[in-house]
Amino acid sequence: MTGQVCQIFSFKDIKATPDPLYELPGQCLTPSPAPIVIDNGSFQTRAGWATSAAELHTPRLLFRSVAARSRGAARSETQIGNDIPNLEPLRWLLKSQFDRNVVVNFEIQELMFDYVFTHLGVTSEGCVDHSIVVTEAPCNPLHCRQMMSELLFECYRVPHVSYGVDGLYSFYHNNNQRNLQLPQTGIVLSSGYHCSHILPVINGRFDAVNCKRVNVAGSQAATYLQRLLQLKYPGHLAAITLSRMEELLHDHSYSAVDYHGELEKWRCPEFYEREVHRMQLPFSGKVPGGCVSVEERQERRTQQLRRLQEINSRRREEKLQQDQERLDRLMAVQELLEDGLLDQFHKSLVELNMDSAEELQSYINKLQIAVDQSRQKLLNAVSRYCCAGNDLMGNLNPAFNMAEYHQLFVGTERLRCPEILFQPSLIGEDQMGLMETLQYVLARYTPEQQEALVSNVFLTGGNMQYPGMKERVERELLAMRPFQSHFKVTMATQPALDAWFGARDWALEHPAAGEAEGWISRQDYEEKGGEYLSEHCSSNAFVPLKVAKPAPARPAEPSATSQTSAGAPADIAMVTSASAYVSTNATMVTT
């Protein structure tokens, strides 16, 4: 490999630093309390203020959406987000509020809100006087929204709450940046930590009926990469941690435009040496026996050779003893012939599976030669091993490179792990990939709507940040769309952060006052229930839950009762009862 430089990288192993306790900025209180924007992601939570102040333009808090608390520990002993410097030692204690991308553990969610409000400087007693903008999953279950509203209104007593979808907020923010005329039609491909989504937007409104979810995203890619490297390097199982695999995905992986063609390139040794990333694992520079002198090292090798010699000599002696015992037995049978004991001789030949005395004599001669040779080899073993040992000691010069032993060669894994987004079958998932799902969603629209949707294909989410992702989506769209049709693919400016920026932009443009669109007031919560959602351009569609009310019992007809009691036939009474049962069921179904 002349003239080629090995690409050796070290793991950053970044340790989280605790977030400071910020003071509440004055511009967040006057002229009215500024809303708090919380991008409640399953991988990372981002929180900040919706204000036009330059110093508060970005989220003030970014931390992992995990909590570490031992069983039976008090709430004050719980570590949240950046309070955990290293996740790996506490991996078995980590808890999240999410099941995939839906909040189900509201005890942990309350701890997350406590962390956010405390570190943002909200110190008001008994309530939070700021409106809250929080993200939720596409098509979030009504029960989950009800529990979230109950937590915010009952526990924190916030004045207003607004819910929106992170991918749609990112779409809204980037459309504003590009100065596109509203309302916009397009389709959002969003891929996060646990799930990926296809989100169609028609005339500025989310079409929840035709959105789809793919249960493959960043966490599955990290787990797949960890499994591949642990199988490849069984000697470094403990060092191949999930945190390091996430770092490998973020910094060293890429999405292949042509997956199979790219794999063919990796077959070339020159391409492999040029593109493989050698990840240096941490190791101790002190090699066992590294300070041993040359004489001691020579003595150790001599002892190893001596042990090897003893083992071989023992095996030869055992083999010689077995051959000698066999030879003695055959000689005893031959003596029977010499003594004239023919019956015993022939019986012994049958036991030895031999036919004649000549065959016995031939076998004795061969065995005698083998025994003599074994004895001679045993006598010469010491001198021969000494000579071989001297030659071996003179020729061997092992150069063990400890640093190279602790390197992970990451080759095709760089593109195989992002590929599961397009081929979930690589990890055993029996479902469609992202682009197949997109094709299925597009097929549910008219040709004119399809043209409008593909003219604005928008990529967002932390799992869309692989190099080559946009080009791969364009190639797949070119293959699935009709000949000479047009489409346009756009990547979010900051795929991981644009959801927060979009929620902040929306909160600034739609202040919470009175019956403002998109905001749920406390009065709305009390009158319409916790599952109520005020729709806006980046929210889910509100589908109220219809509970069937039981039909009131119909009074019994006196004529039928009197006829039955007067001795009417039994079959007529049964028919009347059955018809009443059918009519009651029909009423319930209609309701």
Image: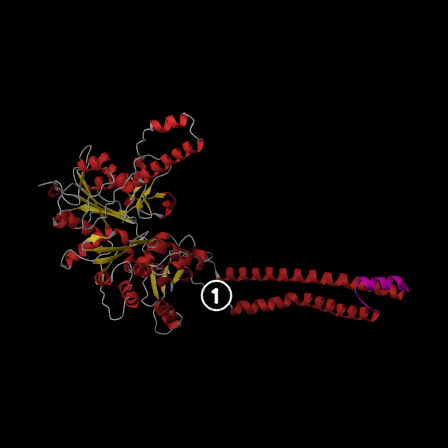
Task: Name the image colouring.
Answer: secondary structure
Please identify the quadrant where the N terminus is shown: bottom left
Residue farthest along the right direction in this orientation: 340
Q: Nearer the viewer, residue 203 or 259?
A: 203
Residue lying at the far bottom in this picture: please name it. Answer: 2
Q: Residue at x 38, y 27 (%)?
A: 563
Nearest to the observer: residue 45 or residue 275? 45
* Left or right of residue 524, residue 221 in this image: right
Q: Which residues are magenta?
A: 339-356
Question: Where is residue 379, by image quadrant?
Answer: bottom right
Residue 346 belongs to magenta span: yes
Disc 1 marks which amino acid? Pro
On screen, residue 550 above or below 466: above
Above or below — where is 486 with respect to 144? Answer: below
Could you tell me how many numbered marks the image carries? 1
Above or below residue 11? Residue 18 is above
* Residue nearest the viewer, comparing 226 with 584: 584
Q: Position of residue 171 (x, y in %)?
A: 20, 55
Quarter placement of the C terminus: top left
Magenta highlight on residue 259: no
Which residue, given by chain and number where applicable, does mark 1 sit on?
A: 398
| Residue 327 in which image quadrant | bottom right
Q: Nearer the viewer, residue 164 or 439?
A: 439
In this orientation, does residue 497 appear? no
Q: Secondary structure at mark 1?
A: loop
**Residue 499 at what x, y percent from top left?**
22, 52
> Residue sitting at 44 percent across and 31 percent down?
570
